[in-house]
Amino acid sequence: MLDLLAGFFRAYDQLLLFAAINSLLALSIYATLSAGMLSLANGAFMAIGAYSSALLTLNQHWPLAASLAAGSLLAGAVGFLLGLPVLRLRGVFLAIATLGFGEVVRIALLNWEPTGGPLGLNAIPATTRLWEVALALVVVSYYFVRLRHSRMGHALLAIREDEPAARTMGINTFYYKNCAFVTGALIAGLAGGFSAHQTHSIEPANFTFGLAVNILIYAIVGGTGAFWGPMLGSTLLTVLPETLRFLKDYRLIFNGLVLLGIIIFLPNGLMSLFQWWPRGRGEATQVTAASLDAVEA
């Protein structure tokens, strides 16, 4: 049995590693969606984490842990500064503003000489290991488990359900939204650092609008009712193309059909399959009221 497991991990090590990194990206957008914010800047934060950690490894010879921490913190710092002006926007206006930021980052990387321009950075040491990404997933997941029943978790839930009502109850909505935004940036930067040290090379073309959309699709497919929903969606969409490799050029079409089917039949994502009792409007109102009371207390 152990030999079979060892053989499985040897055969699919890179696929599992890729799925784990995508799960981190899915958690990064869950952090912002938990506060009702539609942000498309996670791809840009991933690029910041990837390039900064790779440059520290190549030029300063930093160890992996230190370069990952630096890249994640830099992405979080940029997220904090970006959040000061853009988090006053809501809905589609926030999405457009964060999308524009992503394009600014991509063009800056394309024209800045230290980042290698269009050619990017090459010969990055492939030092990322599956257990390291799995450990990061466990730590981030534990954070969201603890967050759910904390004061901040209740505040984010109240903001997501009804921001004007939360503000009326005295909740500092801008503060909590910025905390969620920075959390997403930190996680995306960490995922970028892991990815850079997995793929040997990175370039601006890796961080286009399509990446931001893919990260959002992870959350749509998995569902956003709990932190494990986006992780489930990202894992499915990462593994599915490999399991359908026998379809050759048609496997991406099948991916699209799966996404369309989930949107039509499972509007709350794959998490709907695990919900034994549907929530009605009245229950959602009770949850929001309870969250407001918990924060106020």
Image: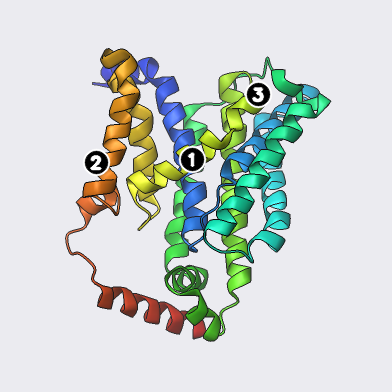
Residue 196 lies, in percent from the top left, at 61, 27
Three-letter code, disc 1: Val
* Quarter of the view holding residue 276: bottom left
Residue 258 lies, in percent from the top left, at 27, 35
Circle nearer the N terminus (3, 2): 3
Residue matched to label 3: 203
Residue matched to label 2: 261
Circle nearer the N terminus (1, 3): 3
Q: Can you say whether 77 is above or below 209 in the image?
A: below
- Circle 1 or circle 3, nearest the eye: 1
Q: Residues within 10 Å of mark 2 (few under 14, many from 20)?
A: few
Three-letter code, disc 2: Gly
Q: Secondary structure under badge 2?
A: helix
Residue matched to label 1: 213
Residue 45 lies, in percent from the top left, at 63, 42
Residue nearer the viewer, 19 or 165: 165
Circle nearer the N terminus (1, 2): 1
Residue nearer the viewer, 73 or 118: 118
Q: Is residue 286 left or right of residue 136?
A: left
| Residue drawn at (60%, 76%) of the image | 172
- Circle 3 or circle 2, nearest the eye: 2
Q: CA distance from mark 3 to mark 2?
A: 33 Å
